Amino acid sequence: MANKGILLVNLGSPKSTEVKDVKEYLDEFLMDEKVIDYRWIFRALLVRGIILNTRPAKSAEAYKTVWTDEGSPLVVITEKIQKKLQKLVDVPVEIGMRYAQPSIEAGIQKLVDQGVTEIVLFPLYPQYAMSTTETVIEKAEEVRKKKFPTVKINYIQPFYDREIYINCLAESIKEKLPENFDALQFSYHGVPERHIYKTDPSNTCKIDDANCINSKIEAHNARCYRHQCYKTTETVIAKMGLPKEKTIVSFQSRLGKDKWIEPYTDETLETIPKKGIKNLAIVCPAFVSDCLETLEEISVEGKEQFLHGGGENFHYIPCLNDEDRWIEVVKTLCEEKLNEFYFV
Ligand SMILES: C=CC1=C(C)c2cc3[nH]c(cc4nc(cc5[nH]c(cc1n2)c(C)c5CCC(=O)O)C(CCC(=O)O)=C4C)c(C)c3C=C
Ligand SMILES: [Fe+2]
Ligand SMILES: [Fe+2]
């Protein structure tokens, strides 16, 4: 009889805020060809020849502002999710990070050491992107084939369209909204436009923005990150009963000189006060756990940009983190996949 287990996978953080550790982390992250998708030589020239000369020091300073006594918020929160989930299920639950430690390999090893032979692996990203879900699955398969060839892994797919998740997110946002706000901004992590086009076999996403965003799920947008972000917003606000006119969608955290998907969060934050939006609530639903990109880039820098542009009140809405209602969703999605093992 097979023994089952769960591996929760998140992005990962540097092991400390020291510049050398941030550099090592950024090297592994940005040399991933699913993140910077140039041929190896051009990727190495850009990452090792340019980005790693200056960015680690800057990022280390940013990490220092969010780091806690227990470590990086992203890793600490993922551990909290693991502990809470472990109390609700009767199979072992471990965590693995796509970059840095604890690695996906270390997570699988811990499960195998407990006798597990069938793993449900949960990439903790609501929307699909080649730089997130795809690279996690590719890495896990590489590790499995090399080190654990007899272990089976069943992957949880992006869940941006699952009713249980949408209900959970809508309730969580509603509870944290201030009484008065002029708009609710949904700021998703950005990706280069090229990544969107690469996942659209028909090229529709490139030709027609509106079609990319609005159309029903078809072959061209089944794995389209931009489409999935807009759909997340649309279904959440429908659930909340919030009019579309009171919402904004934007994309944050761009890197380098490529064109990333628009509108950009930082530019939006500077300009919306001039359009009369003085009281803003903002949420970041590409992230299930708070991290550098939410706690520093949005809560601190984003707030400054908004106030600088003439805004008056900026209200950051935290991610789902280890909220009980979210842990229930994680449990349901994991249990569905655990049960599928009976049919594969
Ligand atoms: C939520 C989904 C994410 C997507 C899509 C994504 C794409 C992506 N990211 C970079 C570059 C960087 N991202 C960084 C941090 C970071 N990114 C995500 C998530 C997504 N990235 C998270 C959760 C975090 C925070 C990690 C933490 O420790 O808290 C960073 C490092 C920080 C910094 O130096 O600013 C970089 C760099 C690219 C290039 C990309 C798509 C191509
Ligand atoms: Fe990122
Ligand atoms: Fe699209």
Image (cartoon, grey):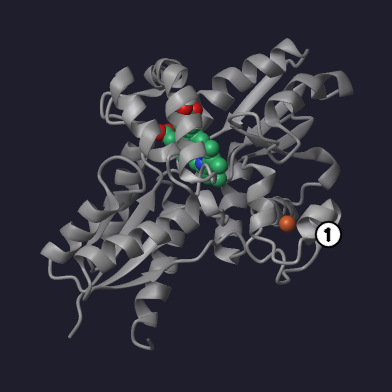
Provide residue 158's location: percent of width, then percent of height: 53, 61
Q: How many marks?
A: 1
Which of these two is toward me, 190 or 184? 190
Residue 142 in percent (x, y) is at 32, 62
Above or below for 310 versus 289: above
Give residue 215's position: percent from left, percent from top: 80, 64
Residue at 39%, 48% in the rendered image: 10
User: Which residue does the image show at 49% across and 23% down from the upper left?
Assistant: 50
Q: In front: 30, or 157?
A: 30
Looking at this rendering, what residue extends furthest in the bottom direction?
Answer: 343
For the N terminus, the image quarter is bottom left
In the rendered image, the vertical position of residue 30 relative to residue 296, given as above or below: below
Can you tell which quarter of the image residue 289 is in?
A: top left
Type of amino acid under label 1: Asn
| Residue 274 visible at all | yes
Residue 286 rendering spot, x and y as whole percentages: 56, 46
Residue 253 appears left or right of 31: right
Q: In the rendered image, which quarter is residue 179 located in?
A: top right
Residue 218: image quadrant is: bottom right
Give the residue pinned by disc 1: 211
Q: Is residue 253 left or right of residue 152?
A: right
Q: Residue, x 72% and y 11% (percent of image)?
A: 308
Which part of the image, by quadrant, shows the C terminus? bottom left
- In the picture shown, does residue 124 fall above or below 60? below
Q: Is mark 1 within 8 Å of ligand 3?
A: yes
Relative horizontal placement of residue 125, taking residue 60 as reference (left or right): right
Secondary structure state at the residue bearing disc 1: helix
